[in-house]
Image (tube, grey):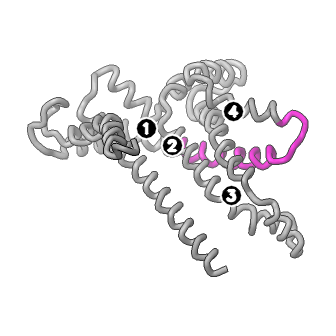
């Protein structure tokens, strides 16, 4: 690679083409004037117009956003508290760490079947929004704990000790010192939880009830029944665009915070 630097660039370009060429073609096909996905006969926005007139899509989108927001808030609060709890050494901490990491490696099919049996058959929670919320919090929690704990473990405890030496109470020290230090990790964990809930198909398909179909499950059901229609292509393009915008906003916010922290360090 040192002798041929262009080879590394070529490999990287091929990887990006392999990853994003299907998505780019999907976006182009969503503006096709015909129903064909293999041949572009003209440009039109008719499929987007028909998509926004479909009440089933709008209802599924509303339910998915409510579910993702609720799951992100609950997972972020519980996961942040768990990350701070695992910061201190106590008997059995290793066991709790392993248990919180299991959802990261357990297949989603197994998780879906297990949650269906537990929440519906044992806990008596009916299929629908309640069962979906419990399930999404259960599998999103591990990602929040991992992200926040990585930041908490690398945090300098002398900052909190300095705040205590200056007379700050534990609540004041947490609000003015600890929380701003871990805020980027908390926001990242919340974003992970939101996107995981918003994009989930496998686990949600087990717990979806009458009138509580999430948007990804709706897309999968429509594609498996009628094939990939232009409306589904347009909807998929919008979902990819929304996810990309959230990612870009997150990168911009992180870059802004880094520049702000650098300016403060230079002033100090």
For marks 4 and 2, give the one nearer the viewer: 4
In the picture of the structure, the residue carrying the numbered disc 4 is 101
Q: In the image, 225: left or right of 25?
A: right
Q: Which mark is residue 182?
A: 3
- Tell whether label 4 touches label 1 (CB within 8 Å): no
Q: Position of residue 111 (x, y in %)?
A: 61, 23
Spatial separation of the CA atoms under disc 4 and disc 2: 19 Å
Residue at image point 43% right, 36% down: 215
Residue at image point 39% right, 41% down: 1
Spatial separation of the CA atoms under disc 2 and disc 1: 16 Å
Residue at image point 81% right, 68% down: 172
For marks 3 and 2, give the one nearer the viewer: 3
Q: In the image, 97: left or right of 12?
A: right
Q: Position of residue 103 (x, y in %)?
A: 64, 29
Residue 239 position by quadrant: top left
In the picture of the structure, the residue carrying the numbered disc 2 is 195
Instruction: Bin the neighbour count of mark 2 within 10 Å (Cα to Cα): few under 14, some 14-19, many 20 and up.
Output: some
Circle 1: element type:
helix
Q: Which mark is residue 60?
A: 1
- Tell whether label 2 touches label 4 (CB within 8 Å): no
Residue 263 position by quadrant: bottom right
Question: With respect to residue 223, does 91 lie above or below?
Answer: below
- Tell whether label 1 touches label 3 (CB within 8 Å): no
Spatial separation of the CA atoms under disc 1 and disc 4: 30 Å
């Amino acid at each position: 690679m040192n002798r041929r630097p262009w080879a590394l660039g070529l490999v990287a370009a091929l990887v990006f083409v392999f990853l994003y060429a299907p998505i780019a073609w999907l976006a182009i096909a969503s503006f096709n004037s015909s129903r064909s996905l293999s041949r572009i006969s003209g440009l039109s926005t008719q499929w987007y117009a028909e998509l926004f007139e479909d009440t089933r899509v709008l209802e599924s989108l509303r339910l998915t956003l409510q579910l993702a927001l609720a799951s992100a808030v609950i997972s972020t609060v519980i996961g942040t508290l768990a990350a701070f709890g695992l910061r201190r050494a106590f008997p059995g901490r290793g066991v709790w760490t392993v248990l919180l990491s299991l959802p990261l490696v357990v297949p989603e099919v197994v998780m879906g079947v297990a949650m269906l049996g537990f929440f519906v058959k044992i806990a008596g929670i009916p299929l629908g929004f309640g069962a979906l919320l419990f399930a999404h919090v259960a599998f999103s929690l591990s990602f929040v704990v991992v992200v926040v704990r990585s930041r908490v473990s690398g945090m300098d405890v002398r900052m909190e000790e300095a705040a205590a030496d200056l007379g700050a109470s534990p609540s004041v020290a947490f609000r003015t010192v600890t929380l701003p230090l871990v805020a980027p990790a908390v926001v990242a964990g919340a974003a992970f939880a939101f996107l995981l809930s918003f994009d989930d198909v496998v686990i949600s398909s087990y717990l979806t009830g009458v009138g509580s179909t999430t948007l990804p499950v709706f897309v999968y059901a429509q594609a498996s029944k009628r094939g990939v229609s232009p409306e589904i292509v347009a909807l998929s393009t919008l979902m990819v665009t929304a996810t990309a915008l959230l990612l870009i906003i997150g990168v911009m916010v992180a870059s802004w915070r880094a520049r702000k922290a650098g300016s403060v360090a230079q002033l100090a």
